[in-house]
Every structure is written in structure tokens, then in C-alpha cells.
Amino acid sequence: MKYYPTPIDTSKIELSSEIQELTEVLAENTHDLWAQQRIKEGWKYGTNRDDIQKTHPGLRPYNQLTETEKEYDRITAMNTLKAMMALGYKIEKKEN
């Protein structure tokens, strides 16, 4: 089976500086949600990933991840925001 991914075209979407700041918050949340699910499934921190022993080096707080590890979550968050905007949604902060 051949698979040809066709993500939403976000090439023309530019994020404001305020939305770019939101990206970091969402990246950390993405990591926390991933870690929470792994822990529920019985995974724990380990220096090496081991699918049998269910250990993963990424099961630690976001601020302890390397920049390379954080970048994966940042890209996911940023592309989600861009996809929402490409689909016509407007992202704005609610005023208090």
C-alpha cells in the first residue's frame, strides 16, 4: 500500500508574534498530554526507549527536554494553529 500524506496547505499562513508565543505553551501541553497517556499505559522514564519494558527517555518535564526534543512538540503545535487558520478559524485571546 502506498501512502501519500496530504496535510492542509499552510504555506501562506503567517503567525503573529502573540500566536507564536502561544505555540510554546501548546508545545508543552502537547508533551504533557503525550506523557500523561504513556504513564496511564504503564510507561516510565528510562534512559533508553524500550517497548517491552515500557521505558522512554522523553518521560520527563518539558523544561528538561533537549531543544531537539522540544522542537518536535513546537512543530506539532505550530502546524495545528496554522491548519486552523487555513481552515478559516480566527485565533484570538479573550479579553478579561
Image (cartoon, rainbow, N blue to C red):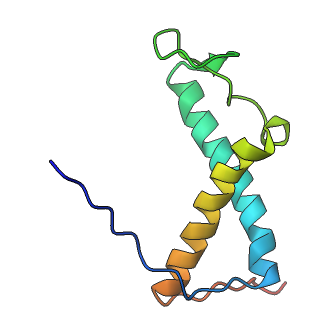
**Measuring 68% from the left and 31% from the top, which residue is drawn there?**
58
- The quadrant of the picture occupied by the C terminus is bottom right
**Measuring 64% from the left and 50% from the top, which residue is drawn there?**
72
Q: Is residue 95 left or right of residue 47?
A: right
**Measuring 79% from the left and 39% from the top, which residue is drawn there?**
66
Quarter location, residue 59 = top right
Q: How many marks?
A: 0
Quarter location, residue 79 = bottom right
**Measuring 72% from the left and 66% from the top, which residue is drawn there?**
23
What x and y, as percent, mark residue 83? 50, 76
Q: Residue furthest left?
A: 1
What x and y, as percent, mark residue 40? 54, 27
What x and y, as percent, mark residue 25? 76, 60
Residue 62 vs 17, above or below: the answer is above
Q: Is residue 81 left or right of residue 64?
A: left
Q: Residue furthest top?
A: 53
What x and y, as percent, mark residue 3? 24, 55
Residue 66 vs 49, above or below: the answer is below
